[in-house]
Image: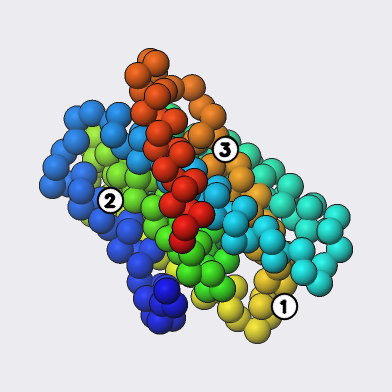
Amino acid sequence: MDFPSAIIYIIPILAVWVGFAFVWFTKPKKNDNIKLLLAFSGAFLLSLTFFELLPGVYNGHDPKTIALYILGGILLQVFLEFFSKGAEHGHMHFHLKHNKFPTLLFLSLSIHALVEGVPIHDNDSILYGIIIHKIPIAIILSIFLINSKMKLPIILLFIGAFSLMTPLGSYISTSPMVANYGNLLTALAIGVFFHISTVILFESAEGHAFNLRKLVVITLGIGIAYLV
């Protein structure tokens, strides 16, 4: 399905706000189902990266150069997590000062979101992956921000600005100055996706029953990605 260009920019914004609205209105107490959704999103995004992005990213470029950019994306994400404490894959080990805008958390998440927006304009399937990745992350982030007792205007400013970052990344990637480096930037995004997805998939789970459920949703995520 080919999306109109405007929709490509609007949907990632809506995905973040859907996650926030879900938390605001339902006040979820248990996070097991959110973790399963996160596992599904990791499997789905990783599979789409293999199926959709990797086959074409090497076209017209030296393989070692592309490989370096993919590895660079992995290292970039590792670096960002020094500041986000793993919020991109559902971990929130961040201590916020009372009613202070969490600048480091915002900047690290924003850079991640900018990079993940790069390949969207060329691949509608990746848009699905980003949406399914963003909703559980937005849910976990919203739970964290609301539970931190920050004032609502600060929370809304954070969520609103964060929601704009992925569309901004997509827009920047289409500009004449950047478009010539499209494959290299896509390779960087692939590295980011690799790191995020594998951490989500291979982190330890709680209890054998949850492990089995996680295996089922991971398998489902791979299967659906193959059919997209």
Sequence-wise, the earlier of marks 2 and 1 is 2
Question: Mark 3 falls on what kind of element?
Answer: helix
Residue at x-position 36% and y-position 28%: 213
Residue 7 percent across, percent down from the top left:
37, 76
Q: CA distance from mark 2 to mark 3?
A: 22 Å
Residue 55 seen from this side: yes
Question: Mark 2 falls on what kind of element?
Answer: helix
Crowd rating for badge 3 (residues with CA inside 10 Å; few <14, some 14–19, many 20+): some
Using residue 203 as the reference point, say whether residue 94 is left or right of it. Answer: left
Q: Disc 2 designates what residue?
A: 19
Q: Disc 3 designates what residue?
A: 198
Q: Nearer the viewer, mark 3 or mark 1?
A: 3
Using residue 173 as the reference point, say whether residue 35 is left or right of it. Answer: left
Residue at x-position 61% and y-position 45%: 194
- Does the residue at mark 3 contact the one at mark 1 (Cβ under 8 Å)? no
Question: Mark 1 falls on what kind of element?
Answer: loop
User: Which residue is more in the foreground, 151 or 112?
Assistant: 112
Q: Disc 1 designates what residue?
A: 180
Sequence-wise, the earlier of marks 2 and 3 is 2
